[in-house]
Image (cartoon, grey):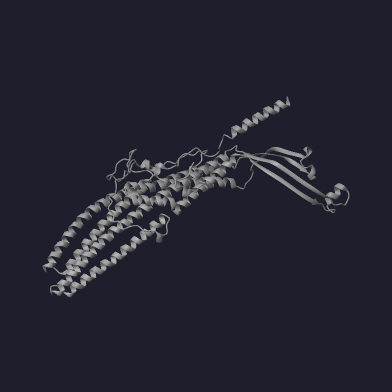
Amino acid sequence: MPNRILKNSALVLTAGIAFLTGCSVGPDYVQPTVVEPAQFKEKGPWKKAEPRDDISKGDWYKVFHDPRLNELEAEAQTANQTLRAAVARVSESRAVARETEADFFPTLDFNATGSRQRTSPNNGQLVAQSGIHKSFTFTSATVVPFDLSYEVDIWGKVRRGFEAAGDQAQASLADYENVLLTLKADVATNYFALRTADSEIDVQRRTIKSYQDALDLTNSRFKGGISTQLDVEQSEATLAAAQAQLATLQQSRAQLEHAIAVLVGKAPATFSLPFNPLDTDPPAIPAGLPSDLLERRPDVAAAERRVAAQNAQIGVAIAAFFPSVHLTGSTGFDSGDLGMLFNWESRIWSYGPSVYFPIFEGGQLEANVKQQRAAYEENVANYRESVLVAFQDVEDSLSSLRYLAQQEEAENRAFQSYKKALDLTNARYTTGLVSYFDVIQAQGLALTAEQLTVQIQGNRIGGTVQLIKALGGGWSDSLITKPDHGDHVASPSVAPTVLGPAASRQ
């Protein structure tokens, strides 16, 4: 009968623990609400995104159809050091999540101790026990091959901690995606800026050639007594100024080339790009709907995952108010004689629970809960701010592209008019109807208009890259999800040379 009572009690206790371990204190996570406009303010020549859009979701830069850009992007994803650091941070966060997951399991240790001791004959306690002043020398050896400890997760402290670690790992992976997206955009932006510089250099070289022809003509006219020394000096000054501007453009190009070298993981001294003036028209990019943006932006996803992680930390803090139960057990051998250490009579064992219950902590636990709740509110605000910034980035890019298109059209008209004005001025100068100063002025206006036309074309390409970045780039191909917290976090989809041989894709 007593045995049956004990068995029934054990069953009730086991069932009670199983029931309690299914509970988790603290708030369950609910994604914070954000204000989503029905559509973007900018109307522009944009269309709604379709499932089979012509933009590659992962390698979106291929929409520009530039083989050299594709090569540079591939090199950057393999060798960029900032991306390598981001991959390392993902591995670190995954390891932290796995470390936290280990708290679900008991710990099992092996312990062995041995000593040789001598007691003092003047030890008062020993004299009182034996009645004589005498020292003792003895050997002690203990071997405990199995020492087990397990914390029963009654209040969900371990589960909430694992949730927080898993969400932080997801946030770290979203950070990696953001670094990757930024890297791709930086490579494309700098590449097209370099090609724009090549176009400006090409314009400047052709202008210098025309200025040199004008100087030769002026010298001939001066020798023939038609032009003045002033015309010659003005022509030479105009040519020299144009040559100085060419050197400035070449300096800018060199710096852009150096920046691209660093992005692709190479020393600037070993890297160069051939001269290649810009001849690319910006592709039409579908902006989609604002609601789609929140699923595509990695920085928004990272902010949202940090909100979830901090929500779980509130549960960890609340669980500290409740008792913690540890189950411990050990078995082994203990003997004062090494020869008898492993005899059956030398066996020892112990098992039993231990309970820790906080009674008075001076308000520390309550303050910790308040801290975690305040941190949660901070993360919610950061998340909502990241959403607003995402909407702003898209609106800025859309408006920039719209106004740049209008500006390019108007500047092209101005350039064509300035070219005609320059031809007319040269003809009038040849016949002596205007001074050389009028020619210089017409040349300057035509050159400025042509340079602005080239710059606006480059700005439109750069603005298109920024719009793709603002829309999240290849976000839809990301490995980031919102998994069950028992799932492992996927590895970044980057080249094996970045991950290393031990970090294979799961």
Say how many tags the image has.
Answer: 0
Residue 238, percent across and down?
23, 68
Relative horizontal placement of residue 19, taking residue 211 as reference (left or right): right
Residue 486, percent across and down?
52, 38
Q: Which residue occupies the extreme right position in the image?
A: 132
Residue 319, percent across and down?
58, 41
Q: As rendered, which of 190 and 172 lies closer to the eye? A: 190
Q: Quadrant of residue 22?
A: top right
- Which part of the image, by quadrant, shows the N terminus? top right
Relative horizontal placement of residue 181, taking residue 352 as reference (left or right): left
Residue 308, percent across and down?
49, 42
Residue occupying image coordinates x 41% and y 55%: 263
Q: Is residue 349 visible?
A: yes
Above or below — where is 325 with respect to 229? above
Q: Is residue 182 visible?
A: no
Above or below — where is 307 with respect to 408? above
